[in-house]
Amino acid sequence: MHEQWLPISDIPVQGREFYFEDDREWAGLCFELGEDYSPLAGMTAVLTVFPQKQGVYFKGFITGLIESPCFRCLEAGQVYVDHHFDVFEDFEEYRQESLAAGILKFENGSWSVNILQVIREQLVLALPNKILCSPDCLGLCPACGENMNLDMCRCETDAGDPRLQILRNLKIKTN
Ligand SMILES: [Zn+2]
Ligand SMILES: [Zn+2]
């Protein structure tokens, strides 16, 4: 996984801004999420890092378009991300849980910050669980797999409800 560790002592208390505008870097970040997310050109994030006594304060935003197969019909769906964030990471929590990987790490007497991890975590929060091509996507027909947004399939008219088909085939014994 991509990492970018910076010593916190290099960042002034007034804060420093970091820009994430590289299309390939975004493609890599989205790929790491393990879904079929692909960012369209022009994804941007701005992150300001403020070192504090007890931890580090992060403020910024992510904007841009991300494409993914629709959860219901598998056609391309898009989501517009416009996510603003404000988070504080406490040194104490990292000391106690001795987190090996994460946003902060303590090594040889000084703290470092993985700014890519901040962006990665915020990207996860920014994305909906299910990306749809449209909020009223009809999805695929469970019987024939036809995309019901394009055309109503024939399952309904030809065969009726497949759950009822079983009843029609039953022979009723009269004697
Ligand atoms: Zn759809
Ligand atoms: Zn069908």
Image (cartoon, grey):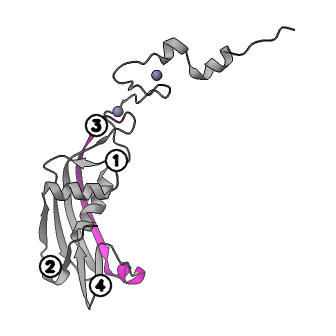
Q: Amino acid at mark 2?
A: Val
Ligand 1 appears in which quadrant? Answer: top left
The answer to whether residue 43 is above or below residue 1 is above
Residue segment shown in magenta: 74-97
Label 1 Cα crowd, 10 Å radius (few <14 / some 14-19 / many 20+): few
148 shown above or below 89: above
Q: Which residue is mark 3?
A: 76
Task: Give the Cα distance between marks 1 and 4.
Answer: 33 Å
> Is disc 4 in contact with disc 2, using a CB cutoff of under 8 Å?
no
User: Which one is earlier in the sequence, the residue at label 3 or at label 1?
Assistant: 3
Q: In terms of depth relative to the viewer, which is nearer, 113 or 61?
A: 113
Sequence-wise first label, 4 or 2: 2
Residue in the foreground of this view, choosing between 134 and 37: 37
Which structural element holds mark 3?
strand
Q: Earlier in the sequence, mark 2 or mark 3?
A: 2
Disc 1 residue lies near ligand 1 with CB under 8 A: no
Q: Is residue 83 above or below residue 142?
A: below
Q: First in sequence, mark 4 or 3: give its number.
A: 3
Residue 103 spot, x, y in % from top left? 29, 72
Q: Which residue, as the protein is rendered here, is positioned at the far top?
A: 174
Distance in Å between CA atoms under marks 4 and 2 = 18 Å
Residue contact between numbered discs 2 and 3, judged by CB atoms under 8 Å: no
- The residue that label 1 is drawn on is 128
